[in-house]
Image: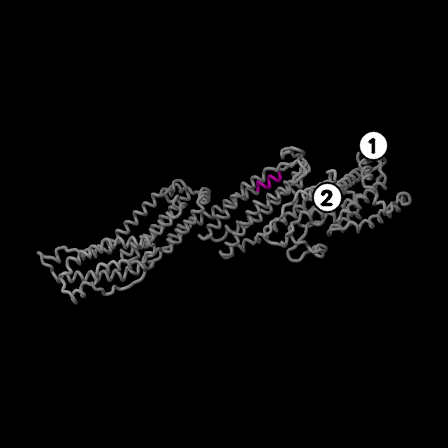
Amino acid sequence: MDRIPVASLKSSSFSAATSREEKLARNLSLGPIKLNEHIKEAQKEKAAALDNAGEAGADAVPEEAAETDLAALSAEIDAFLAAPRDGDALPAVSEVTLDRFASAVEQEIAQSEGTDNKWAPNEAGDKPPLLAAIKRLAALASALTTDNTAPGGATTYTIGVHRVTGVLHRAMTFVEDEFHGMLEDPRVAKVAPQAADTGSATGRSMKRPPSFGQGAELDRCIVPTAFGDASPPFPPETVGRLRAMAEAMFAAGCETECTQVFLVARRNALDASLQSLGYETASIDDVVKMPWEALESEIATWIKAFRHTVEVDLPGQRDLCARVFAAGGQQRCLGRDIFADLAHCAMLHLLNFTEAVVLTKRAAEKLFKVLDMYEAVRDAVPLVDAFLVPPAADDGEGEGAGAGGPGATADEDDGDSGSASTALVDLKHELVSVRTRLSESAAAIFCDLESSIRADAGKQPVPGGAVHPLTRYLMNYLKFACEYKKTLEQVFQEYRRPDDDDDAEHGGGGGGDPFAAQLMEVMELLHGNLEAKSRLYKDPSLSSIFLMNNGRYMLQKIRGSPEINAVVGEAWSRKRSTDLRQYHKNYQRETWSRVLNLLRDDGVITVKGHVQKQVLKDRFKQFNAAMDEIQRTQGSWVVSDEQLQSELRVSIAAVIVPAYRSFLGRFLQHFTAGRQTEKYVKLSGEDLEAIIEELFDGNAVSMPRRRT
């Protein structure tokens, strides 16, 4: 079966219609009609035509003939249609019978307007009487127009043909309007009658294509009347009525009109659904120029709209197509073609946005939204795969009653569903292509972290040896990235480069995982960058504090996140713990070894059993000056991690305070009580403990004079 045409085409079902009938059809196609307004006009035209043919006196039918029993006339028409032909000639039937039948059908349609049960089965469960009448009218028109010649070559039933085809045109316009009204989503604003009559609409409103091929385009827009409301599902009775109307249009040869009305109504419904979710189409230029804050919000809306379309809207449209177009293999194939067009149109409309996002300038903060989009597209592929499997035909008269009969399956369709499969396969390929581009974008953004680290070569050290902003940013970034661990592993598998295996040979748990290898590369670069920054400090002790602060921060982030810890591995964490202990030792050596040396009697203070008092005084002066310098400088240093701060203070106090107390115990007695003691012995053991407890608070203070 060929793909459903997008442009409106005129049905050729009624090729024998005269110019009067075509004119009438065009007039009726401008909008919904009320058949009551045309009954009298058509009857007057018919009577005049019969009079001109010389048969008005014998065959003229009064207006009351429209009320002739439709069942009796239907039986007569059925007999005419079933009668054997004499060669190529039609069996005999009177013009009066044709006229009365057409009038009866016309009256039946007029009486059905405004009623809710016109398309409902009768009490016996048979097809709706109106449907049966219209299908019989279509069969009659086909029989009359297929071979309308007498044995001698003269044209027969001229007036009957005009009458039957005219009523059929009006009937199809009526059915088409009913079909569209029932299919239309309640969120789509109706076009004002004035706009419909002039072929234009204000704002962005639009309507369905005009009836019977008036050359209308299908690229209409819609105006949603409510936002945030899900389109209600079609109940079984509504589906049954839609199916009855579709069957009537198919019987009349109006497949093109039926298809166009269905496509426009359901495309409008899909657009209304997108707008109800807050999604508005933006051009590529608009997206590329959009500030990140605005684009971030747009991406979040797009993801919500995309998932809703794939998971809710399209399955609903597929189900509706299968249930409405269920009468036979040809209709089922057409239903699949319609759904394929709907899905293809809706998805490409959404996927254009991803193309625009990929074209924007890469930035680290965009990674997570790009990954969210990647996940949405990735998750849509198996759903599109499911669309490729034709739905089984239902075997009842309920929601999805199909015409394939009990137990019918898709394999028994007598149509060709290749065009639908082609459209959906193309859609799947487009999804895979978009997924690849999003994957490349995400991987490139993550790999750009290397360049960012290398470019961060600032020459100004962080005050107080605090955690560097780069460390905070990167570790929080990597921690958040590892929450997308499985997705990033997929991304890097698709993005894998030839040297990834070599890059993976780090001390962590990278192994053969290209994402883990890339993350370890970032971690190693950060570590090297911090070591380089530590050399900006002139004080080696402060350099060690800086490395301790940053190393401890990195380790805490790793151990606090199971995801990143699993990627980095325990070996890497142990190595960094070893580094931290070494930084601690370096700090102790650079700062406190010199202080401890002042508290040692290395043979200079006591010589041959005698205390050298001047040397002792100098030692106390030097110790007091050292502690004042340490308090003044290291009090302004920053150790924000409370545990590390406590560990440093405890380790310092454990070494210095006992040594000082011992030194005081040995030599305090050699000073004369009073002013001499106050001059040289300024700190008690408790004073020294208090000074140590004030280190690394970020507050520079000078040591007050204290008395023992």
> For the C terminus, which image quadrant?
bottom left
Q: Which residue sits at x=17%, y=60%?
A: 619
**Residue 407 relative to residue 299: left or right:** right
Q: Which sits in the foreground, 502 or 373?
A: 373
Q: Which residues are magenta?
A: 418-426
Any mark on residue 119, and which? 2
Q: Which residue sits at x=89%, y=46%?
A: 51
Q: Which of pointers 1 and 2 lies earlier in the amino acid sequence?
A: 1
Q: Report whether residue 664 is seen.
A: yes
Label 2 crowding class (10 Å Cα cut-off): few <14, some 14-19, many 20+? Answer: many
> For the N terminus, which image quadrant?
top right
Residue wearing tag 1 = 86
Residue type pointed to by label 2: Trp
Give the structural element (helix, strand or loop) at label 2. loop
Work out which residue is located at the far left of the displayed protein and give it. 608
Q: Which residue sits at x=23%, y=65%?
A: 705
